[in-house]
């Protein structure tokens, strides 16, 4: 494990020239036995397309670093990358990657519905799938699969982490929330978890609506929010929906506090400093004051001309997790890799305050979660640093398992 951590950070520090030197090492060249082919599926079109673009940038950067440092198991990594498009297409492409291209594992996805079909496909083929962006609790519950591991956090983790922030700010007990929810699995899970959280903490629902994923006009919802006069507007929206909401919220002149439980920093950047508002949970952001995190953000910014979004971090980390798992298991055999990932030895440097590890009962990567809060527009100095970043929302001595309390989505049995 220590060697993996040193490899990545060493490459970040040494840069490309030194890495090229490693490629020329005869010992490493002799150890290669053809490329190690990995599949990467993520949406490149539709409302999740902008996040998919970051996912591609993140995993491509990780592959370049890993290959420059000797690859995985002495083999160069070859990424087979495709647009997952929709659940049916995602399943078809996953099956083709396994049957025709003999990939050692599949990484990626953001849509929970597509992650479900990929999970079903890899389970039939006993091939590993590392989910980097789908949050649905059901994927870790009644729809869990033994060959599916989740680098991305599940919905209830965001609710429990961000809920603690709202509790500390006095915005739950006796308060009324208006909740807008994207009408698909991701949103449904967040809504169920938010309802449970409010019930546990004496909060009330002032109003709630399900929003079609292709909705762009929020006028009707703005009128309902204005009439309800909530203490907090909680959004369980996704992708470009959040950007559209922010812009229209300002146009309607509404000033009720805004927050929510599912968020990507791409939405904040797309909204811009004038429109972005509220406090949101975040699995990772480029402003974390952690040395390794700053190194990753600096290298990504140098390569792509902009800081990494949290989806870029997810796909970047997933490939390093695969590298560590294959090397610690001594190969790509799925059963051996699963045994390692479920063991107490499998701890991963996630560029965060503390290492992460997979919860063996549902294969969720337990990890710290942070919050970002919008800066007043007159305090913003550039188009990327438009928010402040908190420290880890859980206390240092609080177990990460607390983030899984009252998860919805049923129980995981790994039976199917």
Image (cartoon, grey):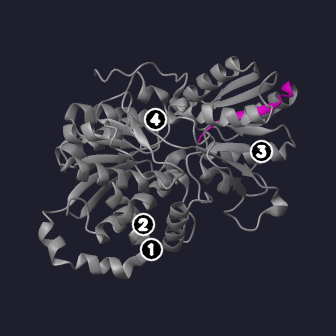
Whether tag 1 and tag 3 are in contact, CB under 8 A, the answer is no
Disc 1 versus disc 4: nearer the observer: 1
Disc 4 versus disc 3: nearer the observer: 4
Check if residue 233 falls in the magenta segment.
yes
Which callout, 1 or 4, points at the residue further toward the start of the chain?
Answer: 1
Judging from the image, what secondary structure is the residue with disc 1 in?
helix
Check if residue 36 falls in the magenta segment.
no
Gap between marks 2 and 3, in whole Å? 42 Å
Q: Residue at x 30, y 54 (%)?
A: 323
Q: Residue at x 29, y 67 (%)?
A: 67
Gap between marks 1 and 2, in whole Å? 6 Å
The residue under label 1 is 13
Gap between marks 4 and 3, in whole Å? 27 Å
Q: Is residue 308 visible?
A: yes
191 vs 395: above or below: above
123 vs 6: above or below: above
Disc 1 versus disc 3: nearer the observer: 1
Residue 58 image offset from top left, x and y in percent: 44, 59
The residue under label 3 is 248
Classify mark 1: residues with Cα within 10 Å, few (<14), some (14-19) or many (20+).
few
Which callout, 2 or 4, points at the residue further toward the start of the chain?
Answer: 2
């Amino acid at each position: 494990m220590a060697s993996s951590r040193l490899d990545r950070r060493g490459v970040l520090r040494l840069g490309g020239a030194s890495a090229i030197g490693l490629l020329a090492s005869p010992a490493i060249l002799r150890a290669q036995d053809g490329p190690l082919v990995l599949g990467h599926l993520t949406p490149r079109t539709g409302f999740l397309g902008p996040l998919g673009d970051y996912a591609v940038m993140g995993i491509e950067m990780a592959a370049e670093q890993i290959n420059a440092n000797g690859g995985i198991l002495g083999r160069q990594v070859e990424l087979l990358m495709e647009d997952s498009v929709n659940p049916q297409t995602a399943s078809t492409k996953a099956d083709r990657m396994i049957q025709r291209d003999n990939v050692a594992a599949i990484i990626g996805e953001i849509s929970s519905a597509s992650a479900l079909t990929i999970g079903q496909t890899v389970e039939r083929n006993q091939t590993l799938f590392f989910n980097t962006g789908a949050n649905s609790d059901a994927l870790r519950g009644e729809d869990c699969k033994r060959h599916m591991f989740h680098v991305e956090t599940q919905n209830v983790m965001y609710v429990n982490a961000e809920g603690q922030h709202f509790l500390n700010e006095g915005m739950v007990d006796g308060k009324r929330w208006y909740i807008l929810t994207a009408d698909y699995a991701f949103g449904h899970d967040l809504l169920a978890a938010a309802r449970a959280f409010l019930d546990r903490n004496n909060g009330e629902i002032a109003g709630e609506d399900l929003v079609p994923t292709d909705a762009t006009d929020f006028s009707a919802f703005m009128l309902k929010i204005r009439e309800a006069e909530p203490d907090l507007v909680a959004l369980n929206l996704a992708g470009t929906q959040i950007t559209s909401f922010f812009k229209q919220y300002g146009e309607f002149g509404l000033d009720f506090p805004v927050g929510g439980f599912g968020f990507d920093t791409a939405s904040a950047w797309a909204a811009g400093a004038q429109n972005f508002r509220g406090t949101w949970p975040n699995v990772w952001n480029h402003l974390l004051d952690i040395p390794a995190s700053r190194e990753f953000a600096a290298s990504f910014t140098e390569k792509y001309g902009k800081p990494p979004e949290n989806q870029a971090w997810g796909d970047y980390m997933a490939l390093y997790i695969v590298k560590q798992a294959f090397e610690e298991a001594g190969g790509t055999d799925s059963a051996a890799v699963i045994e390692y990932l479920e063991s107490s030895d499998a701890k991963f440097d996630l560029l965060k305050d503390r290492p992460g590890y997979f919860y063996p009962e549902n294969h969720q990567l337990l990890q710290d979660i942070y919050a970002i809060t919008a800066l007043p527009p007159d305090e913003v100095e550039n188009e990327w640093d438009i928010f402040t970043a908190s420290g880890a929302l859980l206390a240092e001595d609080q177990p990460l398992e607390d983030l899984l309390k009252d998860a919805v989505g049923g129980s995981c049995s790994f039976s199917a």
